């Protein structure tokens, strides 16, 4: 199954995708994670996008589409994938439709003020990307990843100014994709607020309803 997780920054796309990977056995492909990996490894791409990510603006479409196309061609993506953070503009969605067939787009709806609260308390493992929250989901030992022992840090774009930029960019450039995919009959919108386990249960119920309908 080829899935897209759509939603504002902090909507919980990464958190839900990590849970869905265990259920569906398909890879979680986050364009933000791919960019952060390139920045960490100081590749040509990483140097090009470092300041863009820190500011909260979007990386140009051609750069992003080329990176995704390369990632989707890897063997583990042959049986399906969860795309998180891509597409984020209409030209990216059009490009994806030329590269692959999308089965379902799941939009997680969360109010802006909730997003700001979540992102200002988020922490992430620098080594493996595992997502934490100092208020709701702290690592067992402060600053140390439970999963790999890596350093748990604050993303450079989780500063208030960059959070505001990301939110306004989301509303201007990404939210129109809700109607775009809705028009193609591919969209399912879920309430993204509430306990992560409850949000995930809504996602599971959505998949079960689709399965029942297909039978
Ligand atoms: P990206 O990494 O995709 O960032 P984002 O879209 O801003 O989304 P986030 O990762 O911030 O949020 P999330 O929805 O994954 O939430 P999470 O699960 O972590 O992109 C970063 C940058 O890369 C962009 O700004 C851009 O520069 C560039 N980029 C990426 N893709 C691009 C593209 N396609 N085109 C151009 N540029 C691109 O959860 C957030 C917090 O909330 C965590 O602390 C978590 O523990 C907590 N939480 C999660 N769910 C719940 C819940 N239900 N209740 C309470 N807390 C919760
Ligand atoms: Mg994320």
Image (tube, rainbow, N blue to C red):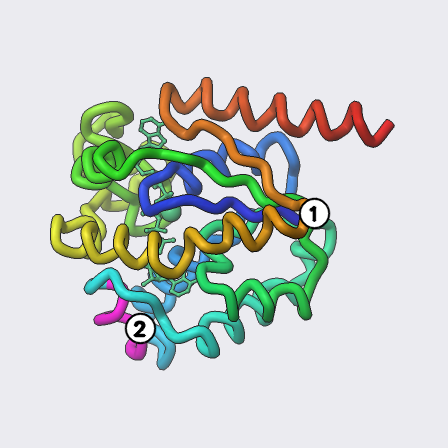
Q: Earlier in the sequence, mark 1 or mark 2?
A: 2
Query: What is the x, y in percent for residue 23?
Result: 62, 30
Image quadrant occupied by the N terminus: top right
Residue for point 31% across, 73% down: 49
In the rendered view, tell whether residue 17 sits above or below residue 155. Answer: above
In the rendered view, tell whether residue 136 sits above or below residue 75. Answer: above
Closer to us: 129 or 122: 122
Left or right of 202, for residue 208: right
Query: What is the x, y in percent for residue 130?
Result: 36, 41
Q: Secondary structure at mark 2?
A: helix
Residue for point 62% across, 21% down: 205
Disc 1 residue crowd, few under 14, some 14–19, many 20+, Cα 10 Å: few
Query: What is the x, y in percent for residue 183?
Result: 63, 50
The mark closer to the camera, 1 or 2, is 1
In magenta, the rendered stretch is 47-53
Q: Is mark 2 within 8 Å of ligand 1?
A: yes
Q: Pointers 1 and 2 in contact (CB under 8 A)?
A: no
Disc 2 residue crowd, few under 14, some 14–19, many 20+, Cα 10 Å: many
Q: Is residue 58 magenta?
A: no
Residue for point 37% across, 19% down: 195
Circle on res. 103: 1
In the rendered view, tell whether residue 6 sits above or below residue 94. Answer: above
Circle on res. 49: 2
Query: What is the x, y in percent for residue 201?
Result: 54, 20
Left or right of 22, for residue 56: left
Image quadrant occupied by the C terminus: top right
Left or right of 123, for residue 43: right
Residue 144 visible within the image: no
């Amino acid at each position: 199954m080829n899935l897209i997780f759509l939603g504002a920054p902090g909507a919980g796309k990464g958190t839900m995708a990590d849970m869905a990977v265990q259920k569906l056995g398909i890879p979680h492909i986050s364009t933000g994670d791919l960019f952060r990996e390139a920045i960490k490894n100081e590749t040509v791409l990483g140097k090009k996008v470092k300041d863009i990510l820190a500011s909260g603006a979007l990386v140009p479409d051609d750069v992003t589409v080329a990176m995704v196309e390369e990632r989707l061609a890897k063997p583990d993506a042959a049986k399906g994938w969860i795309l998180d953070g891509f597409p984020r503009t209409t030209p990216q969605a059009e490009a994806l439709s030329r590269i692959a067939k999308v089965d379902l787009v799941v939009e997680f709806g969360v109010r802006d003020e909730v997003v700001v609260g979540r992102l200002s308390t988020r922490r992430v493992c620098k080594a493996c990307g595992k997502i934490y929250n100092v208020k709701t989901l702290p690592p067992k030992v402060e600053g140390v990843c439970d999963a790999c022992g890596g350093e748990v840090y604050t993303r450079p774009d989780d500063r208030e100014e960059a959070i505001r930029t990301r939110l306004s960019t989301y509303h201007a450039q990404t939210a129109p994709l809700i109607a775009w995919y809705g028009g193609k009959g591919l969209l399912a919108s879920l309430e993204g607020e509430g306990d992560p386990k409850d949000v995930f249960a809504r996602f599971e119920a959505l998949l079960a309803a689709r399965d029942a309908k297909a039978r």
